[in-house]
Amino acid sequence: MNHRHIGSIQWEQAIGCARQACARIFRDGGNPGAALSAFGLAVPDGTDWSTAIDRIALALCTPQQRKAA
């Protein structure tokens, strides 16, 4: 993953949150695809936990665009 535009502190916090969320989903019997779906992300074939954590962390760091009223 290319996350050079993200500050190191923000990235470490996002990784921690993503790991915690994935751990809860794993504990409840989920798989990496379920974790990505929980964050509204696309689920590519063959996704493992490491990839899921990276993609979730990247999504957490991406600024959300507001919709016009």
Image (spheres, grey):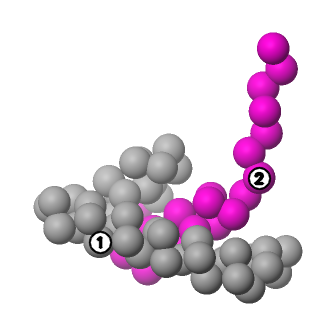
Question: Label 1 sits on what residue type?
Answer: Ala
* Residue located at (74% from left, 85% from top): 8
Residue 23, image quadrant: bottom left
Q: Residues within 10 Å of mark 2 (few under 14, many from 20)?
A: few
Mark 1: which secondary structure?
helix
Q: On the rendered structure, is 4 left or right of 13? A: right
From which residue to which does the magenta span run? 45-69
Q: Are marks 1 and 2 in contact (CB under 8 Å)?
A: no
Q: On the rendered structure, is 42 left or right of 65? A: left
Mark 2: which secondary structure?
loop
Q: On the rendered structure, is 60 left or right of 52? A: right
* Residue located at (14% from left, 61% from top): 29
Q: Which residue is mark 1?
A: 23
Question: Label 2 sits on what residue type?
Answer: Pro
Is residue 21 visible to the viewer in this orientation of the structure? yes
Q: Quadrant of the C terminus?
A: top right
Q: CA distance from mark 1 to mark 2?
A: 24 Å
Residue 2, image quadrant: bottom right
* Residue located at (58% from left, 71% from top): 14
Q: Which residue is mark 2?
A: 63
Marked residue nearer the N-terminal end (1 or 2): 1
Is residue 46 visible to the viewer in this orientation of the structure? no
Q: On the rendered structure, is 13 left or right of 2? A: left
Query: Please, is residue 27 above or below residue 15 in the view?
Result: above
Residue 28 spot, x, y in % from top left: 16, 60
* Residue located at (26% from left, 61% from top): 25
Residue 67, image quadrant: top right
Residue 39 spot, x, y in % from top left: 48, 49
Residue 61 spot, x, y in % from top left: 69, 63
| Depth order, front residue of 61/3 | 61
Q: Is residue 29 magenta?
A: no
Residue 41 spot, x, y in % from top left: 52, 50
